[in-house]
Image: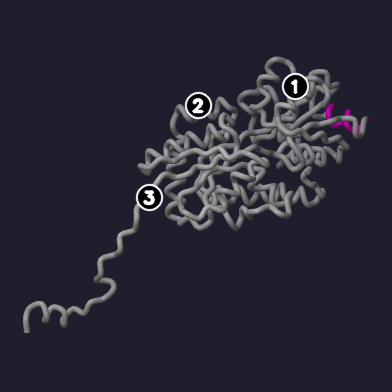
């Protein structure tokens, strides 16, 4: 019996003895990084910073695509429906936490079709009023609203938006204040009307109204973060004013299609965290008024689920419907 035959008889061939099939490296080609808002927006700033880091780490381009529209749901739907393994991106409050409660025919289900990679940034909101508003603080705001039911007009960028829901939540916590909601197509229009006195109040991301506040064209009565907003150190938080557990934020989360392997999600989270740790990136985002977070996947998923339960529950309890 020759040597080769003796070896085969002595050591039967098993699957374990076969060389493992080489797994293709990922990515195999450029990756589309969807940002569901226009170029120049804060989500675009965050997305481009993260995409640049991912490109350097993985050795392939991560091409930012701005797919704006429908409050971010169009771009978010593109990420949810992608099935070629080379599409990911970021999304925000509306498409991930409130849209399912607002739109019965939403073409995607965030819980089913997407996986959170990292909570990238979040920004506290502020209750702001016209400079001539008679109240100087939150207690005065509540007292004026009680004395004049329905007379305080507040703006937002639409039913179910972050500012709309935060104001309704605050009104309920202050004893069921009756306020008049005025929806706008966008933030610039609402801000112009606040400054002009056509509406009296808004709850809005604090950083977005810093120029108006610093120029005296608007006043902030309270902020909604767990600590004071750095750009408005003199303005108390709702918690400081005795309203517990009312914190609210605008936030951005990196997301991938649900079929993405867990190991890839973990690696993407690590690189997103590294991107946000870059001093230049952190400085730009903080200058835009955001708190840099850079969480892991588990924390991000828990955060999004909690936000969906909180704000989606409020939408259903109040019977809020989207316009149009």
Is residue 141 rendered magenta in the image?
yes
What whole-number distance in Å separates the C-alpha atoms at marks 1 and 2?
26 Å
Report x, y in % for residue 309. 69, 52
Q: Position of residue 9 (x, y in %)?
A: 16, 82
Residue 84 in the figure: left or right of residue 146: left
Q: Which residue is mark 3?
A: 28
Say which label, 1 or 2, has the lower sequence index: 1
Q: Residues within 10 Å of mark 3 (few under 14, many from 20)?
A: few
Quadrant containing the N terminus in the rendered view: bottom left
Element carrying mark 1: strand
**Mark found first going from the N terminus, 3 or 2:** 3
Q: CA distance from mark 3 to mark 1?
A: 52 Å
Report the residue marked by disc 2: 283
Of helix, strand and loop, which one carries label 2? helix
Magenta range? 140-147
Residue that carries the numbered disc 1 in the rendered image: 219
What distance separates the C-alpha of mark 3 from that of mark 2?
A: 33 Å
């Amino acid at each position: 019996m020759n040597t080769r035959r003796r070896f085969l008889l002595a050591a039967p061939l098993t699957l374990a003895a076969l060389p493992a099939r080489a797994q293709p490296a990922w990515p195999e080609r450029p990756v589309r990084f969807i940002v569901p808002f226009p170029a120049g927006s804060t989500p675009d700033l965050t997305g481009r910073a993260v995409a640049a880091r991912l490109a350097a780490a993985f050795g392939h381009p991560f091409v930012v695509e701005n797919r704006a529209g429908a409050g971010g749901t169009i771009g978010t739907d593109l990420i949810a429906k992608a099935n070629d393994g080379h599409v990911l991106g970021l999304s925000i409050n509306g498409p991930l936490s409130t849209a399912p409660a607002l739109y019965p025919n939403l073409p995607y289900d965030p819980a089913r079709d997407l996986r959170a990679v990292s909570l990238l940034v979040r920004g506290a909101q502020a209750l702001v009023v016209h400079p001539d508003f008679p109240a100087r603080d939150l207690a005065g705001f509540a007292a004026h609203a009680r004395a004049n039911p329905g007379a305080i007009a507040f703006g937002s960028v639409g039913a179910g938006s972050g500012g709309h829901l935060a104001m309704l939540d605050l009104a309920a916590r202050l004893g069921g204040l009756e306020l008049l909601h005025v929806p706008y197509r966008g933030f610039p229009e609402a801000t112009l009307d606040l400054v002009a006195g056509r509406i009296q109040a808004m709850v809005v991301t604090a950083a977005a109204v810093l120029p108006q506040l610093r120029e005296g064209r608007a006043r902030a009565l309270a902020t909604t973060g767990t600590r004071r907003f750095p750009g408005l150190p003199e303005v108390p938080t709702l918690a400081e004013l005795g309203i517990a557990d009312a914190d609210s934020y605008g936030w951005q989360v990196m997301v991938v299609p649900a079929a993405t392997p867990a190991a890839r999600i973990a690696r993407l989270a690590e690189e997103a965290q590294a991107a946000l740790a870059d001093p230049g990136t952190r400085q730009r985002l903080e200058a835009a008024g955001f708190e840099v977070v850079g969480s892991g996947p588990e924390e991000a998923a828990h955060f999004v689920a909690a936000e969906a339960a909180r704000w989606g529950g409020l939408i259903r309890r109040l019977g809020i419907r989207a316009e149009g």
